Image (spheres, rainbow, N blue to C red):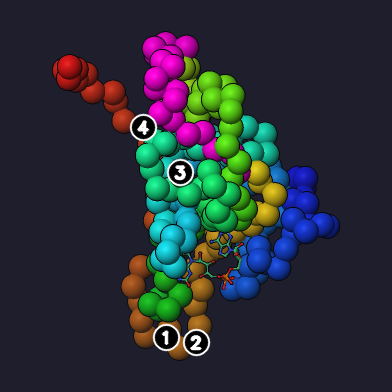
Amino acid sequence: MGTPLDRGTDRGTDRTRVRRLPELQVDDVAVLHGILDAGTVGHLSIVHDGQPYAIPVAYGRSGSTVLFHGSTGSRLFRTLAGGAPCCFTVTLLDGLVLARSAFETSMHYRSVMVLGSCTVVEDKLPALSVISEHIVPGRWALVRPPSRKELAATLVLALALDEVSVKVSDGPPSTSPEDAGFEPWTGVVPFRVARGEPIECEEEA
Ligand SMILES: Cc1cc2nc3c(=O)[nH]c(=O)nc-3n(C[C@H](O)[C@H](O)[C@H](O)COP(=O)(O)OP(=O)(O)OC[C@H]3O[C@@H](n4cnc5c(N)ncnc54)[C@H](O)[C@@H]3O)c2cc1C
């Protein structure tokens, strides 16, 4: 049993209570961190002029904060820098659950949803190194660091892991008496995201 997410205060709000299959909700901060650390891409969502947008982004985790970087010209980052409410999700697809019925065919997954508002990070370099190390560990020490001009063109944002939910689906396929007579293969087809062999490339000037 890990450390529970803090649900004793306004952090454990009604907004982060899973309604559908609530038994799949996990209140363990180690699982939360494990999903965020295993993911590479998340989706940051905002509402702009009444229209929701879910935008894929890179991220990194520092303790109980998620960090993002983006252009000062980006609508997403400018909106978030202004304190707009947002929703951030990370989803790891672990498998396809092939049941006898179309209705029960589903997926194995681990997913995180964070609600809140971002704050602007003034001390950008350490935050940028966290994001870089999250994506390619060890790379930050090798690459040219951002110039003053590049830093000025970059917004760095932090989102606290305060109002969070974690959902994990890992059960076997469900069946029912109505499935009798239907005999497709049933089971789980695992999904993995793996790094391949690096490919040498010509550099572009
Ligand atoms: C890869 C994948 C595929 C899925 N495919 C489907 C599908 O095809 N159809 C379908 O109905 N559902 C699907 N789900 C589940 C879906 O994400 C929602 O959990 C579900 O549809 C809505 O649950 P709810 O009514 O409790 O959510 P809501 O009432 O809309 O949400 C209440 C709160 O629950 C929490 N929550 C809900 N879902 C998640 C989640 N996945 N992870 C973390 N926190 C969550 C959030 O904090 C949210 O604010 C899929 C999930 C994953 C990860």
- Given this view, does label 3 or label 1 mark the residue nearer the observer? 3
Residue type at mark 3 is Phe
3 or 1: tag closer to the N-terminus:
3
Q: What residue do we see at 44% from left, 67% from top?
A: 50
Quick check: marks 3 and 4 in contact, CB under 8 Å? Answer: no
Judging by the rendered image, the residue that carries numbered circle 4 is 195
Figure quadrant of residue 166: bottom right
Structural distance between the alpha carbons of marks 1 and 2? 6 Å
Which tag, 4 or 2, sits closer to the chain's start?
Answer: 2
Q: Residues within 10 Å of mark 3 (few under 14, many from 20)?
A: many
* Residue type for callout 4: Arg
Q: Residue at x 59, y 24 (%)?
A: 123
Reading the image, the residue beneath label 3 is 77
The crowd level at tag 2 (other Cα within 10 Å; few <14, some 14-19, many 20+) is few
Q: Nearer the viewer, mark 1 or mark 4?
A: 4
Q: Helix or strand or loop: what does disc 1 sit on?
A: loop
Q: Residue 127: image x %, image y %?
A: 56, 27
Pointer 2: what residue?
Answer: 177
CB atoms of marks 1 and 2 within 8 Å: yes
> Can you give x and y, in whole percent of width and height, for residue 110 in the image?
54, 53
What segment carries the magenta color? Answer: 141-159
